Amino acid sequence: MRFASLGSGSEGNALLISAASGATTTHLMLDCGFVTRELVRRIARFDIDPSCLAGVIVTHEHSDHVGGVFRLARQYRLPVWMSYGTWEASRSEAHGVDIRICRDTQPFDVGDLQITPYTVPHDAREPLQYVATDGRRKLGVLTDIGRATPHVIDSLAGCDALLLEFNHDSEMLEKSAYPASLKSRIAGPLGHLSNRHAAMLLAAIDKSRLTTLVAAHLSKKNNTPELVSAAIDEVVGGGVGVQIASQEQGVGWITC
């Protein structure tokens, strides 16, 4: 199993997850916050045509995650998995799309992959994040969450690879020109993880199998890769490979 980010941040998010078994290969996309033309440009770097995708799974209805999903799904006739609440929040855009409802802790199969959704606290209708496995390796994905919960920590236990939000540095956010209401939303319990809270979450989960960590969804204005790296170094040993996904380039293929 391997994965790659097409881009990660407030301007758009998309993650490829791929698994092979014998003569078959499954390519699945998690979120798509890019318009179709931009998605096609970005996905070409990974030698994948959108028509080869087995489908799209969606975390929540915010535009940087779902903005390009429905047009992509209609154009390439792809099924889309999401929570009922996410469908309710975005149903006006979903006409003609094969929507498949998924639920917390109820795994479903997509080709060579098994996907398990889990609920998270975020200011969306019914947000989910996901764990993917090919039966041998486990990939955890966690972006757009205000605070860790015991359920989140349990869901990410024993991952071989983890893509985790490190959205902002609290001091940079507080000193930023953002309005007070936006600062409160971002830093609140239904907002986004600060570097400190992401590190605390990382410290709490079972990392006994963790070999790869990708820091994601960094704020361009209120964070830096250097601050993220410093936060990670406090809780992760040298046996874990660390990469940082950018808005422009994401991160290349990583094998779990």
Image (cartoon, rainbow, N blue to C red):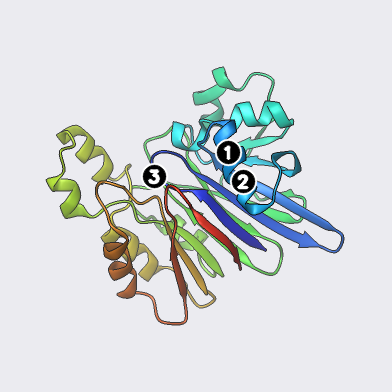
Residue 43 disc label: 2
Give the distance between the C-alpha atoms of the residues marked 1 and 3, in whole angstroms: 28 Å
Q: Quadrant of the C terminus?
A: bottom right
Residue 133's x, y, as percent?
66, 61
> Badge 3 local density, few (<14 within 10 Å), some, or many (20+)?
some
| SS at mark 3 in the image | loop
Q: Which residue is mark 3?
A: 121
> What is the spatial separation of the Cα atoms under label 1 and label 2, in whole angstroms?
6 Å
* Residue 55 rendering spot, x and y as whole percentages: 69, 40
Residue 195 horizontal side relative to residue 119, left or right = left
Pick the residue in front: 130 or 2.
2
Q: Residues within 10 Å of mark 2 (few under 14, many from 20)?
A: some
Point 51% across, 59% down: residue: 155
Point out residue 236 in the picture as x, y percentages from the top left corner. 38, 75
Amino acid found under the numbered disc labelled 2: Ile
Q: Toward which corner of the image does residue 228 lie, by quadrant?
A: bottom left
Question: Could you tell me which residue is drawn at 41 percent across and 59 percent down?
Answer: 150
Give the side of residue 189 with respect to residue 20, left or right: left
Q: Which mark is residue 211?
A: none
- Camera-side residue of 250 and 107: 250
Residue assigned mark 1: 39
Report the Cα–Cα distance between label 3 and label 2. Answer: 30 Å
Q: Is residue 79 above or below residue 167?
A: above
Whichever of callouts 1 and 3 sits on the residue coming sooner in the sequence is 1
- Which residue: 72% across, 32% down? 76
**CB under 8 Å between callouts 1 and 2?**
yes
How would you rate the neighbour count of disc 1 (Cα within 10 Å): few for under 14, some for 14-19, many for 20 or more? many
Question: Which amino acid, mark 1?
Answer: Leu
Total labels drawn? 3
Furthest residue toward bottom = 238
